[in-house]
Image (spheres, helix red, strand yellow):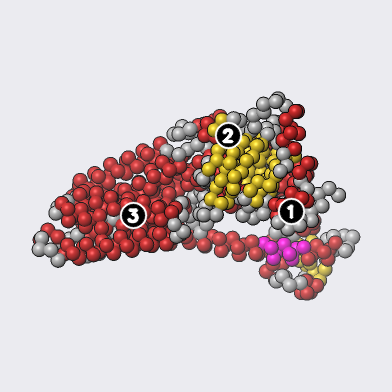
Amino acid sequence: MRNESKEDIKPSTASERVFAVKVDDLTVAYNYKPVLWDIDLEIPEGVLMAIVGPNGAGKSTLIKSILGILKPIAGSVTIYGKPYEKQRRLVAYVPQKGSVDWDFPTTALDVVMMGTYGSLGWIKRPGQKEKKASLEALEKVGMLPFKNRQISQLSGGQQQRIFLARALVQNASIYFMDEPFQGVDATTEIAIINILKELRRAGKTVIVVHHDLQTVPEYFDWVTFLNVKKIATGPVKDIFNDDNLTKTYGINYQVSIQE
Amino acid sequence: MDISKYIELVFTDYTLRTITLGTAILGAITGMLGSFAVLRKQSLLGDAISHAALPGIAIAFLITGAKDTNTLLIGALVSGLIGTFWIKNIVTKTHLKSDTALGLILSVFFGFGMLLLTFIQKQPNANQAGLDKYLFGQAATLVESDVWMMAIVTGICLMVMLTFWKEFKILLFDADYTKTLGFNTKTIDILITVFIVLAIVLGLQTVGVVLMSAMLLAPAAAARQWTNSLAKMVFLAAVFGAFSGVFGTAISASQNNLSTGPVIVLVASVFVGFSFIFSPSRGLLFKQIRVIKNRRDLELHKTLAFMYHIAETHENTSHPHKIKLLNNFHGYTKSTLQKLVDKNYVKINGSMWSLTETGFETAANLYTKQETEDE
């Protein structure tokens, strides 16, 4: 039970803190076996958080359940104290790159524009304002020269940046990203992490499913260890240690965190 | 029959005009909706739905005893929708994959439909003859009211598609993401699926249960080859579908006894074949040509680079060298040398070659800029 972290943060802010994301008793099962068991999670505003855990630990499932893509068996999710359904506009999602067909007949700009569909609502079409916002998002991820490219003609890293731009255009307060560094080269990885850090500086909350344990201390300031159950959550400097890694990954994990 | 005479006949002859119009409209709507089916990777759904419609036709006949097209097609619509609903349920509620679910529903419904058809044929009711036309379709039985029906459904479908264009597009591309934006993906999904079922049912009379799925897939597959825009793809698929209908009808009308449905499907597959080979960006032909051209360019550049390494060792980079020297280089041929001369990279003097200044410059900068151009 590592709850010191929560005590750490409380005094620094108001006494009754409203969390950016609060998950209560979340349980998800695909068939009989639970994928997530009784997850309680409180994510404070303005953190850049990694969700780590072995394959099959339920990392993507956790994000998808919070976002209502999957239906949990039990539990509830609140965003800034209100049910997620009422706070959708505050939340943006970057799915795994492999979850869509990149041969779909559309351009990079068109995909980014999809990020504006939510605020447009039903039927209304995107206009000049939406286009301008999308071009700005493309510029931010360094993809403006590729705006008219068919998306299949982009490299894996470029496709990931397009997905990021689509989330940026939503202008949300909380960003959920499912393995944004998967299959991208070093240049793109640095470009993406710089954008994520910029988001945090702007006071946004960013939650990232992450695989590369070595980079956790460098990239993130908050971390959640997950393996079906929540193992620990809190500031990286306090809880990213061999003890929690071993609890999460089962084996005696020999990652020397700080040399 | 010559063409001008045929065209005149299309406008004057009632039957021919009705069939041509009917098949054209049918081709347009199936092409349009087929694009959605193809992009959702539900190509086989059309096949399952059309086969699932057969028992509905038989049951509608058994209940009403009438052979009126609209009654039978309502039966087809109902059983087509039931089939589709079951497929979706099988996929979400069991471990079976969608191909298994499609195959299962297709064969079970078709089998049951055939059973009912043979049962009907054994009955003394003289009215029963001709129900089997729904197996392979019989365009000649189209009448004006059928065409009106098709036109109205196509019009409604077009209107719905234009209204919900944005929603359709985003659902086709990324369903999970669509959900997070707050759209009710189930509603959009039902809209698309119901229209696909409607289009299929409309085509049963003309093309038949067995070949109907080709009408859905062929124009869409052909259209995908020519464009990278969803709007253009849907439009092109509608055009290809309509032309398949018109040409197919023309061929079957001018050649006696060729049944229209299969001819339309064959014409549509000619569109597909042509598009697969000749499309500029995705076609096999131009792809192959590009591969060969790239290979030649690479060979040329390799030769140039080899020359550059020789010339580099001299102070005067245009110093002549023996052509023989190049023989130990693998990629070198007489024709590559000639091409380099044509490009003014190299000068030839008897058995000697020398790099020109442009040649030297080009060789020095080969492939160093590639990375920056790409990113």
Disc sitting over residue B83 in the figure = 3
Q: Give the label, 2 or 3, closer to the camera.
A: 2
Q: Mark 3, chain letter?
A: B
x, y percentage for residue B9?
A: 21, 52
Give the secondary structure at mark 3.
Answer: helix
Are the residues tagged 2 and 3 within 8 Å (C-beta)?
no
Q: Is residue A95 left or right of residue B135?
A: right
Q: Is residue B21 magenta?
A: no
Name the residue rendered at 61%, 43% in the picture: A39
Q: Which residue position is annotated with label 2?
A: A78
Q: Nearer the viewer, residue A207 or B355?
A: A207
x, y percentage for residue B34?
A: 39, 51
Q: Is residue B281 left or right of residue B71?
A: right
Residue B242, compared with residue A17, is above or below; it is below
* Magenta stretch bounds: B297-305
| Amino acid type, callout 2 | Thr
Q: Which residue position is annotated with label 1?
A: A246
Q: Mark 1, chain letter?
A: A
Q: Is residue A102 left or right of residue B130?
A: right
Q: Is residue B302 magenta?
A: yes
Q: Nearer the viewer, residue A36 or A80?
A: A36
